[in-house]
Image (cartoon, rainbow, N blue to C red):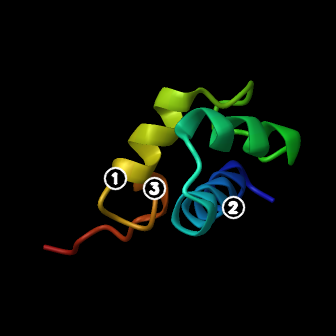
């Protein structure tokens, strides 16, 4: 898996945990770490990172969005 695919898997799992279980950002970060779904830049998930990721209006991170043609 590429870094972007791993990040997308983490994003999907975080959305699922937030929507279905209504968990806090701290608990979501802990679960993502336990499931070894690492953030794009490695290391561990931080609750603020989870919050910003879930607050993003698009379903895709910027690295996976299609570029608009002019």
Could you tell which of marks 2 and 1 lies nearer the N-terminus?
2
Disc 3 versus disc 1: distance between alpha carbons? Answer: 8 Å
Residue at left 21%, top 75%? 69
Assess whether mark 1 and mark 2 are in contact (beta carbons under 8 angstroms). no
Quadrant for residue 46, please give it: top right
**Of the two numbered discs 3 and 2 in the rendering, the one whose residue sits closer to the viewer:** 2
Task: Read off the residue under disc 1.
Answer: 56
Label 1 residue SS = loop
Neighbour class for label 2 at 10 Å: few (<14), some, many (≥20)? some
| Secondary structure category for the residue under label 2 | helix
* Mark closer to the observer (3, 1): 1
Which quadrant of the figure contains the N terminus?
bottom right
Q: CA distance from mark 3 to mark 2?
A: 11 Å
Label 3 vs 2, first from the N-terminus: 2
Identify the residue under disc 3.
61
Residue 53 pos. (x, y %): 45, 46
Q: Please tell me how crowded label 3 is: few (under 14), some (14-19), or many (20+) other residues with Cα within 10 Å.
A: some
Q: Secondary structure at mark 3?
A: loop
Position of residue 67 in the picture relative to residue 15 (left or right): left
- Quarter of the image for residue 15 reads bottom right
Label pair 3/1, CB-CB below 8 angstroms: yes
Image quarter of residue 12: bottom right
Number of marks in picture: 3
Q: Residue at x 29, y 60 (%)?
A: 57
For residue 37, the mark is: none
The disc at residue 9 is 2
| Side of 24 relative to 44 (left or right) | left
Identify which residue, 11 or 42, lies in the foreground.
11
- Residue displayed at 13% across by 73% down: 70
């Amino acid at each position: 898996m590429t870094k972007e695919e791993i990040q997308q898997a983490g994003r999907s799992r975080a959305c699922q945990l937030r929507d279905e279980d209504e968990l806090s950002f701290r608990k979501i970060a802990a679960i993502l770490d336990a499931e070894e779904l690492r953030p794009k830049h490695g290391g561990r998930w931080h609750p603020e990172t989870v919050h910003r990721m879930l607050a993003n209006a698009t379903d895709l991170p910027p690295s996976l969005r299609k570029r608009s043609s002019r």
